[in-house]
Image (spheres, rainbow, N blue to C red):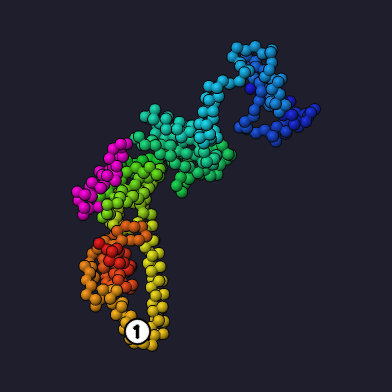
Amino acid sequence: GRIFIEDVSDLIPEHQDPVEARDWLQKYVHRDMVIPCRIKEINYRVFIVTLTSKGSDLKDAQRWENREDIVDEYLSLSGPTQEEKALLADDQKRGKQRRRFKIRRVNHPLFKPVSREQAEEFLSRNDSERVIFRPSSKGTDHLTCTWRLKDQFFHFDIIEKKKPDAMSLGEVLIVDGLKYEDLDEIVARYVDRVEDNMLALTEHDKFFEIEEGGTTVQDWLTDLKQHNPRTIPYCFYHSKKLHMAMEVGFIPGTRRVMKEFVKVTPRGFRYRHKDHRSVRALINYFKKHAARPPPQVQRKIETARANAAGNHRQSVKREARHTRGSSSSSRVKSETSSRQRRDGRGSGRTTRYQPGMQVRAYFQQDGQWYPAKIIGKGRQPGTFAVEYQGYPGEYHDLREQDLR
């Protein structure tokens, strides 16, 4: 189609020369701009449509739509039917749900101007294809890579730097903080290596394939725990919450299944903020630290320890002031006797917990039970000083009901 300069807008000054017309167009009209128009003329012989986008023509329905001189068996001036309106509304609704992207000028055989759904459909139909680069809905300084591994689809973001222009490919490409020079290098040094690591983990005998309607991870681990309560059953499986990641599920001595993310990277596997080069190294580290609280719980333990230490110092200061202010020795003896009775000493009260015993101790911050050792009597009356396994020198005062 074409629009003559005089039909672009009512705002164009009259009697302007070609230079003024060009300057006006560059100021108010730009590439990829959507302009509503009316059809003025159709040249069927050369397949050209002449359009007008002037506001006066768009508003003048009487002139353009109620015309008796138009004879075209395919043109209806009565408007869309109810069925056509419903189809149009459905198309508009689906169009809003899809995030739009701009067409990019990327000269590479693996780049295709398609959406996420179209990329997955293309890779599903073509067994020989496994990687597609496509435009990103985040803007023209991003690309998205979609790759297929068996029946799984993975998508990751590529940040572009040093771009010659807005639509061209950047000279520096960044994926997960790693820099690459071109798309081929991303395939060779990122996609291929992540795929190798992903396959190594999925082919391990501890990998659990989740099937729709089949046994769940929780049921499978719980059944293993019931058959052998002294072990820590575990398995790896694809994460539904995080792309290009696995999850490890395990039961560390309780009936509740714990879940943690395992990020698959070109360098191996990232678990508990540490990089592991191989599946064997990952599993060895997991077995060694599975019984210990994860890093986020460890931070809570340290915070609780600091708070407990501060509270204990305040308690000691208050007791010292109270003792100095007391002039009656009988009162001191009475308080001492009262503390002993509350602590279970001198009152005939017995307890099955003794210093040196290995127990499972309740941790209030996350509501879990962890292996621990009783060190002795706690600083607070009626408590035991407990040291969690893997945290030597860190003592917590727990009541008898918090031990088992």
Locate the C terminus by quadrant: bottom left
Q: Is 325 left or right of 389, judged from the image as shown?
A: right
Q: Residue 277: tell me if it is visible.
A: no
Specify the segment rendered in magenta: 203-232
Residue 391 percent across, percent down from the top left: 32, 64
Residue 26 percent across, percent down from the top left: 69, 34
Q: Is 319 left or right of 71, judged from the image as shown?
A: left
Residue appearing at x 72%, y 26% in the figure? 56
Residue appearing at x 53%, y 25% in the figure? 86
Q: Amino acid at mark 1?
A: Arg
Q: Which residue is mark 1?
A: 331
Residue appearing at x 41%, y 78% in the figure? 318
- Tell me the element at label 1: helix
Quadrant of residue 62 in the image? top right
Q: Residue 75: tell me if it is visible.
A: yes
Residue appearing at x 69%, y 13% in the figure? 68
Q: Is 380 left or right of 352, judged from the image as shown?
A: right
Outermost residue to the left: 227
Question: As displayed, is residue 246 above or below residue 349?
Answer: above
Question: As displayed, is residue 346 above or below residue 132?
Answer: below
Give the main secondary structure of the magenta stretch: loop
